[in-house]
Image (tube, rainbow, N blue to C red):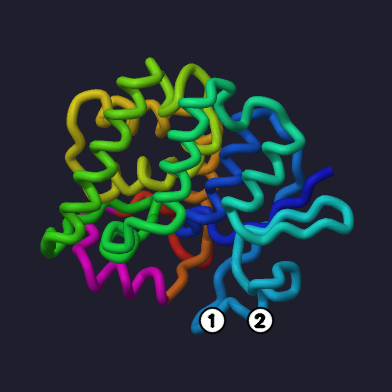
């Protein structure tokens, strides 16, 4: 059975991607969750991940340590993780790769924090540009391929890659237009996403680095997480 190594569910957007892909598509795996360590998690994560980062997938003697590489590895072994239609598949690959390597302003100002609601101090132009691009991508995919998912009727890798953005949309009250706003809500209601959220809210850990970044960019106006250290 696959083994998937992840970080805190409240914070780790990179971990969420393969986790939600596998759960949504009924690919069995054993989960290993290791919380972030104050200062640097590199040494801790190096025990199971060559890069010292999460996520990391182990399949027997095979180790895959990047969320996009994990998705491609799984797609080679499980049919339908990319759309069958070649036009939808090429679009989905481009959109997933763009999410994987881009959106720096959105990542920086709106870090994933599942259990809180935040009022940002400001909305600088690079952040607004990233939000507009998400809006554009989502509306394009839903329009071109008929929904309800980004590249057609099935939940595929590209949807998994944007699942962390759905949490960000809710946490930071990010305004999207039309079908894109409805799509964010659909992602949040997926059984796999609800399971991830339930576990995230129950976590007793707080990571100082993530919490400091949150305070740098915004004000927490609601916190639904269990008390730290319970």
Helix, strand, or loop for circle 1? loop
The dominant secondary structure in magenta is helix
Q: Position of residue 96 (x, y in %)?
A: 46, 44
| On screen, residue 212 above or below 11 | below
- Dot 2 alpha-carbon crowd within 10 angstroms: few under 14, some 14 to 19, many 20 or more: few
* Residue 33 picture location, percent across and down: 65, 58
Residue at 70% across / 27% down in the picture? 79
Q: Quadrant where the N terminus lies?
A: top right
Q: Name the residue located 20 percent from the left edge and 64 percent from the top edge.
A: 218
Mark 2: which secondary structure? helix
Which is nearer the eye, 166 or 136?
136
Look at the image and give the residue range highlighted in magenta: 209-222
- All told, the count of numbered labels is 2
Marks 1 and 2 close (CB-CB < 8 Å)? yes
Give the residue pinned by disc 2.
Answer: 43
> Callout 1: few (<14), some (14-19), or many (20+) C-alpha neighbours within 10 Å?
few
Residue 195: x percent and y percent? 55, 37
Q: Quadrant of residue 223?
A: bottom left
Could you say which disc has been placed on residue 40 in the image? 1
Q: In the rendered image, which quarter is residue 132 located in? A: top left
């Amino acid at each position: 059975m696959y083994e998937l190594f992840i970080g805190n569910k409240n914070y780790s957007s990179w971990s969420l991607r393969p986790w939600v892909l596998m759960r949504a598509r009924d690919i069995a795996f054993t989960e290993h969750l290791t919380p972030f360590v104050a200062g640097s998690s590199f040494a801790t994560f190096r025990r199971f991940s060559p890069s010292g980062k999460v996520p990391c997938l182990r399949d027997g003697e095979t180790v895959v340590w990047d969320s996009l590489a994990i998705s491609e590895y799984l797609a080679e072994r499980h049919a339908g993780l990319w759309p069958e239609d070649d036009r939808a598949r090429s679009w989905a690959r481009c959109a997933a790769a763009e999410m994987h390597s881009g959106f720096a302003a959105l990542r920086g100002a709106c870090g994933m924090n599942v259990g809180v609601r935040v009022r940002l101090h400001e909305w600088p132009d690079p952040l607004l540009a990233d939000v507009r691009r998400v809006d554009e991508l989502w509306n394009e995919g839903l329009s071109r391929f008929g929904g309800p998912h980004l590249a057609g009727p099935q939940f595929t890798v590209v949807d998994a890659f944007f699942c962390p953005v759905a949490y960000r949309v809710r946490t930071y009250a990010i305004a999207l237009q039309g079908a894109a706003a409805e799509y964010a809500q659909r992602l949040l209601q997926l059984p796999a996403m609800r399971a991830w959220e339930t576990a995230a809210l129950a976590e007793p850990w707080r990571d100082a680095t993530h919490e400091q970044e949150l305070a740098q960019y915004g004000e927490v106006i609601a916190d639904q997480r269990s008390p730290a250290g319970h």
